Amino acid sequence: MTLSVHDMKLEMSLALVPSPTKLPQVRSFVRLQLRWWGLEEGVVDDALVVVGELLANVVKHVGEGECGLALRVGDGVLHVRVRDGSSVLSAVKWPSAYGVRECEEGRGLLIVDRLTGGAWGAERSPGGGKVVFGRLSLGVERDASHWHAFYWAGSGLPTRGEETDPDSSKPPAVNDASAAWVRKPASLHAGQLADIAACVAWLEARLADDRPVARIPARSLVGYAQGELDHGLRKLPLQWSTLDGRIVRLMLLACPSRSRAFRCPGPVAS
């Protein structure tokens, strides 16, 4: 299973070979990701059912060939897309001769139809195969309620072993998953920040204390960070060398107010 997660745009995609034994693992990952995005628990539960039914259809009707799952939040809607290699379009088999309880075939899509309010469908892909999609309303979208700042400075870059060791005093690579930072010592947690202005002020303070080498102007780092944050970035990693030969690593991380997958660490900044 390979994956790509883009928190900035609230998008994630998975490439996987589904099987009955792997579906619980996929659902667990999707649950964590949707909670991290701050979605209401009811929406998360409905999304897991939709994802489970669509992937189960792939296993049942297509087999265990590679397929793709994509989730995206936008315009108050959670978009779910499942891609597979079959060109046969999915369709609800509405009960006719049999009662609803006796009609198993196509019942998964009846559930999808109900949970999405009919906002689902299937279409053939230009390169072959098809995509089945569905849309779930989120109600009111929630923005990140606060940010956390993570900071570390040292004389040399951590080794791979130190980056993956939760007991090491050295940090993981700045682009590693956010959870890796949480497992590090509390000394790496620099506090909670209220908004983007506070994030930029915190970065400016760090640049004043840990002045970058001349080829990395502080104003350029601040300008880059401001631009990324203004465009909705939820995780901003930075790294630079100081005039006295140290390496500074820091991360600004947005924490959704209703996130249950990620416990925000560190003391609240006064």
Image (spheres, grey):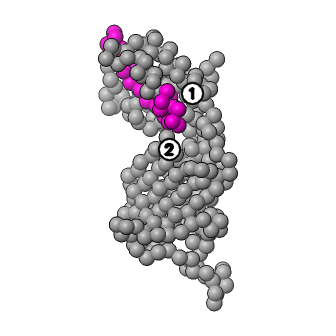
Front-most of residues 161 and 108:
108
- Indicate the amino acid at tag 1: Ile
What label does residue 196 carry, if any? 1
- Which residue occupies 58% across, 35% down? 255
> At which x and y percent is residue 99?
67, 84
Which is more N-terminal, label 1 or label 2? 2
127 vs 193, left or right, is left
**Magenta-highlighted residues:** 226-253
Q: CA distance from mark 2 to mark 1?
A: 17 Å
- Which residue occupies 31% across, 17% down? 215
- Which residue occupies 47% across, 32% down? 228
Pointer 2 residue: 9
Query: Can the viewer see residue 254?
Result: yes
- Indicate the amino acid at tag 2: Lys
Q: Secondary structure at mark 1?
A: helix
- When asked about the image quadrant of residue 177, the answer is top left
User: In the picture shown, does residue 86 fall above or below 267?
Assistant: below
Question: Crowding near pointer 2: few (<14 within 10 Å), some, many (20+)?
Answer: some
